């Protein structure tokens, strides 16, 4: 299969990452079926995608006609069976190995043997996920960054058994989405989170130890290092539960105490302070 053979893509999971991924595929000329468990989640996703495209039209980064065409290429369904005609499936459901494995197990009997399975996991092992299917050579990580329509990176993660053909196809596909693929081997945290999460964790330690206020820590990194968001604001943006889960995967998988999650991060997650999505994290937000 070449990238020109890819006409239809299925995106499983319509949360922040899933709806962003569906949007960029639809904008790039692919037919997209966005699949989730409930109509309510799907309706919310379509309204987010429409809002994001309207923002791009307003900023003159997209024409109104292109927006209408992209939306017409996007369909939704609550049935996984609708992934049947997809040449590529991108999974972006909750970061839970059992949930993801179950979905790939079902997709195995729905999709043809040539269909490429990609996971947007931010930290779970691609090699292990691939091994829950009988197509480990056609299994790959496609790790998009939030907000997906804006961020240029796709970490393309090779599992131990991923074939060169699957890698080349996925890298080419990422380019068709207007993204820059970066080749990454499958180790906990890949590259992005291996480097980002220790910085966020250290910022939380610095705050816990009273080195500086939340605002002071973020100001230092924004004004001193030119980061677009301070690390604590970014942690809220990503979700504190997601940050904790990624640090736990790295701590467990790499065994080095430098990845131990800060106790304040654990306490905030226990309190339900999950960042922007829950209305409270290091900052407070209007829901
Ligand atoms: N859809 C469409 N357009 C969007 C958008 C969206 N969802 N989000 C932002 N934009 C556009 C805005 O309209 C704006 O357009 P112009 O430049 O034409 O004005 C542009 O993006 C910048 O947005 P804002 O002016 O609102 O705000 P900003 O300048 O602060 O930029 C940001 C926002 C791009 C998110 C920037 O703050 C940033 O780069 N932050 C860091 C994000 C980051 O690190 N992401 C990675 C997180 S880690 C991850 O995702 C992986 C993981 O596994 C945890």
Image (spheres, rainbow, N blue to C red):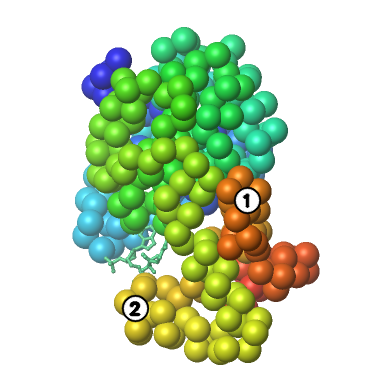
Q: Residue at x 66, y 81 (%)?
A: 208
The residue indicated by pointer 1 is 255
Q: Measuring from the top left, give residue 114's x and y in whole percent.
A: 41, 12
Q: 169 and 164: which one is in front?
A: 164
Q: Is ligand 1 within 8 Å of the beta carbon of the residue shown at mark 1?
A: no
Where 216 falls versus 56 (above or below)? below
Q: Measuring from the top left, give residue 236's x and y in whole percent.
A: 57, 68
**Secondary structure under the numbered disc 2 in the rendered image:** helix
Quadrant location, the N terminus: top left
Q: Name the side, left or right, on which 242 lies relative to 2.
A: right
Where 110 falls versus 159 (above or below)? above
Residue 247's image quarter?
bottom right
Residue 259's image quarter?
bottom right
Viewer-nearest of labels 1 and 2? 1
Q: Which mark is residue 227?
A: none
Alpha-carbon neighbours of circle 2 within 10 Å: few (<14), some, or many (≥20)? few
Q: Measuring from the top left, give residue 225's x and y in whole percent.
A: 34, 78
Q: Is residue 181 visible?
A: yes
Alpha-carbon neighbours of circle 1 within 10 Å: few (<14), some, or many (≥20)? few
The residue indicated by pointer 2 is 225
Q: Measuring from the top left, give residue 201's x and y in whole percent.
A: 57, 68
Q: Residue at x 62, y 68 (%)?
A: 275
Picture quarter with ligand 1? bottom left
């Amino acid at each position: 299969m070449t990238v020109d053979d890819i006409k239809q893509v299925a995106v499983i999971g319509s949360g922040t990452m899933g709806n962003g991924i569906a949007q960029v595929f639809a904008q790039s000329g692919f037919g997209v079926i966005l699949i989730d468990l409930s109509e309510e989640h799907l309706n919310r996703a379509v309204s987010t995608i429409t809002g994001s495209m309207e923002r791009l039209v307003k900023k003159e980064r997209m024409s109104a006609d292109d927006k209408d065409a992209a939306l017409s290429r996007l369909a939704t369904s609550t049935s996984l069976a609708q992934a049947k005609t997809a040449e590529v499936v991108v999974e972006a459901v909750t970061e839970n190995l059992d949930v993801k494995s179950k979905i790939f197990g079902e997709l195995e009997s729905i999709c043809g043997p040539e269909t490429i399975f990609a996971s947007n996991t931010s930290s779970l092992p691609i090699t292990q996920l691939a091994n829950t299917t009988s197509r480990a050579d056609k299994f790959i990580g496609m790790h998009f960054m939030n907000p997906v329509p804006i961020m240029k990176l796709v970490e393309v993660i090779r599992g131990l058994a991923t074939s060169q053909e699957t890698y080349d196809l996925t890298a080419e596909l990422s380019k068709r989405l207007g993204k820059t693929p970066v080749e990454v081997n499958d180790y906990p945290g890949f590259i992005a989170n291996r480097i980002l999460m220790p910085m966020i964790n250290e910022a939380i330690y610095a705050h816990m130890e009273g080195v500086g206020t939340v605002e002071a820590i973020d100001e230092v990194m924004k004004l001193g290092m030119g980061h677009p968001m301070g690390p604590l604001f970014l942690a809220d943006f990503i979700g504190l539960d997601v940050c904790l889960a990624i640090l736990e995967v790295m701590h467990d998988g790499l065994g080095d105490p430098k990845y131990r999650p800060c106790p304040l991060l654990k306490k905030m997650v226990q309190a339900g302070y999950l960042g922007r999505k829950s209305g409270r994290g290091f900052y407070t937000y209007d829901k």
